[in-house]
């Protein structure tokens, strides 16, 4: 059971997001420093888990084999730098399917809590969108927004009021890890 857990979004947080969806390994491009940041988390004793909406499946844009190929490529790229992701939780549903796992609903995060047998209170959830922050708040995680994806335009500005008040903002995943690891000794007591 992990005592040190970080939950990450995928597109816009670890890799470049695409309005056309990431449908193949060739379309998956890591953001600068993101894979190294995950490796630093691992080396500091953190378990890293993904929670990602993948509505391209529900929309018929790609299938499970394509998603698995993207994730295999991501994990191989990460392993080459000494990092790992312990588990990947994803919502395959289209926005109109009314599921409980599509962020901003907290279902994926609740699945992680169940799988690992830990409460998520205070667990960092890092994502690039409002819906990520809303899901984090609904699951009692600490919301961390990175400005590498959907809300990059918010750099240097106050967050809009619809963001949870506790949202912490970071330039990118590496900056989040810098802050977390700087605070890790006090937080791991």
Image: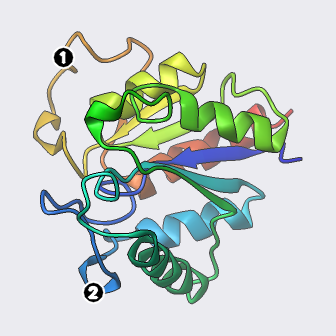
Q: Which mark is residue 160?
A: 1
Return the residue nearer the eye: 188 or 20: 20
Q: Position of residue 65 (x, y in %)?
A: 45, 78
Q: Is residue 168 visible?
A: no
- Residue 72 tag number: none
Q: Which residue does the image show at 37% across and 70% down from the upper left? A: 63
In the rendered image, residue 112, in percent from the top left (x then y), is placed at: 68, 41
Q: Position of residue 33 (x, y in %)?
A: 39, 70
Q: Is residue 60 left or right of residue 5?
A: left
**Drawn side of residue 112 relative to residue 24, left or right:** right
Residue 74 at least partly seen: yes
Distance (Cα) linking label 2 and label 1: 35 Å
Above-or-below relation of 81 to 139: below
| Residue on which the image places disc 2 | 26
Q: Residue at x 77, y 45 (%)?
A: 4
The answer to which quarter of the image holds residue 75 is bottom right
From the viewer's perspective, is 168 left or right of 77? Answer: left
């Amino acid at each position: 059971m992990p005592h040190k857990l970080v939950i990450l979004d995928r597109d816009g947080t670890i890799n470049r997001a695409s309005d056309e969806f990431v449908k193949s390994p060739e379309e998956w491009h890591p953001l600068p420093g993101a894979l190294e940041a995950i490796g630093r988390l691992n080396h500091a004793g953190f378990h890293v888990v993904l929670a990602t909406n993948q509505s391209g499946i529900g929309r018929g844009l790609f299938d499970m084999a394509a998603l698995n190929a993207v994730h295999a490529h991501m994990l191989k790229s990460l392993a080459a730098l000494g990092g790992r992701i312990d588990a990947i939780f994803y919502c395959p549903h289209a926005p109109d399917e009314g599921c409980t796992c599509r962020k901003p609903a907290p279902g994926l995060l609740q699945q992680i809590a169940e799988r690992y047998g830990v409460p998520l209170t205070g667990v960092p959830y890092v994502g690039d969108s409002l819906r990520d922050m809303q899901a984090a708040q609904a699951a009692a995680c600490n919301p961390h927004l990175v400005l590498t994806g959907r809300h990059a335009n918010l750099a240097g500005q106050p967050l809009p009021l619809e963001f949870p008040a506790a949202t912490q903002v970071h330039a990118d995943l590496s900056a989040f890890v810098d802050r977390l690891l700087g605070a890790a000794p006090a937080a791991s007591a």
